[in-house]
């Protein structure tokens, strides 16, 4: 099941693990890690108006977990999310 959630991308980190038995399955691999500050929202901005006022604490996740990018617009003290994502414009990242 896919969960729709929104957040602000704060930083991208490239993590390279050396060929070392101490890293087990991670050894010799490179990962792109995203630091994301999630937005407290309810709903899916592709089909309804979604707004938020507060953010939560940032967390780190593999870039493979990000399926699309969206925009945001501020109106008074509320941020609105613009999500026009669909399968016709897939996102891709190159390391």
Image (cartoon, rainbow, N blue to C red):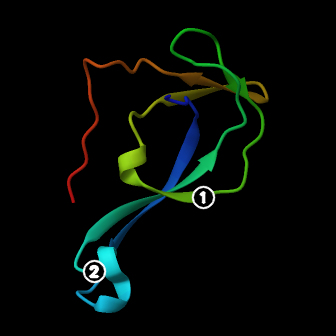
Circle 2 SS class: loop
Q: Kindly identify the residue that appears in the image at 25 percent across and 17 percent down.
A: 88
Position of residue 16 relative to residue 69, above or below, is below
Q: Return the x and y of residue 89 as percentages of the image width and height.
A: 26, 23
Is 42 placed left or right of 62 in the picture? right
Q: Return the x and y of residue 42 as percentages of the image width and height.
A: 70, 24
Q: Which is more N-terminal, label 2 or label 1?
A: 2
The residue at which mark 1 appears reads as 59
Q: Kindly identify the residue that appears in the image at 77 percent across and 34 percent down.
A: 53
Q: Return the x and y of residue 9 as percentages of the image width and height.
A: 50, 49
Q: Label 2: few (<14), some or many (≥20) within 10 Å?
A: some
Position of residue 11 relative to residue 2, above or below, is below
**Discs 1, 2 touching: Cβ within 8 Å:** no
Q: Is residue 16 visible?
A: no
Picture quadrant of residue 49: top right
The residue at which mark 2 appears reads as 27
Circle 1 SS class: strand
Q: Return the x and y of residue 77 as percentages of the image width and height.
A: 79, 29
Find the distance from the CA under tag 1 to the CA under tag 2. Answer: 23 Å
Q: Kindly identify the residue that appears in the image at 70 percent across and 29 percent down.
A: 41
Q: In front: 8, or 4?
A: 4
């Amino acid at each position: 099941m896919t969960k729709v959630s929104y957040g602000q991308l704060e930083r991208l980190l490239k993590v390279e693990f050396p060929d070392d038995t101490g890293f087990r399955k991670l050894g010799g691999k490179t990962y792109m890690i995203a630091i994301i500050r999630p937005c407290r929202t309810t709903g899916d901005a592709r089909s309804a108006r979604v707004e938020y006022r507060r953010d939560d604490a940032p967390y780190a996740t593999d870039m493979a977990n990000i399926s699309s990018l969206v925009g945001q617009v501020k109106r008074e003290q509320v941020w609105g999310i613009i999500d026009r994502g669909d399968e016709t414009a897939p996102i891709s990242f190159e390391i």
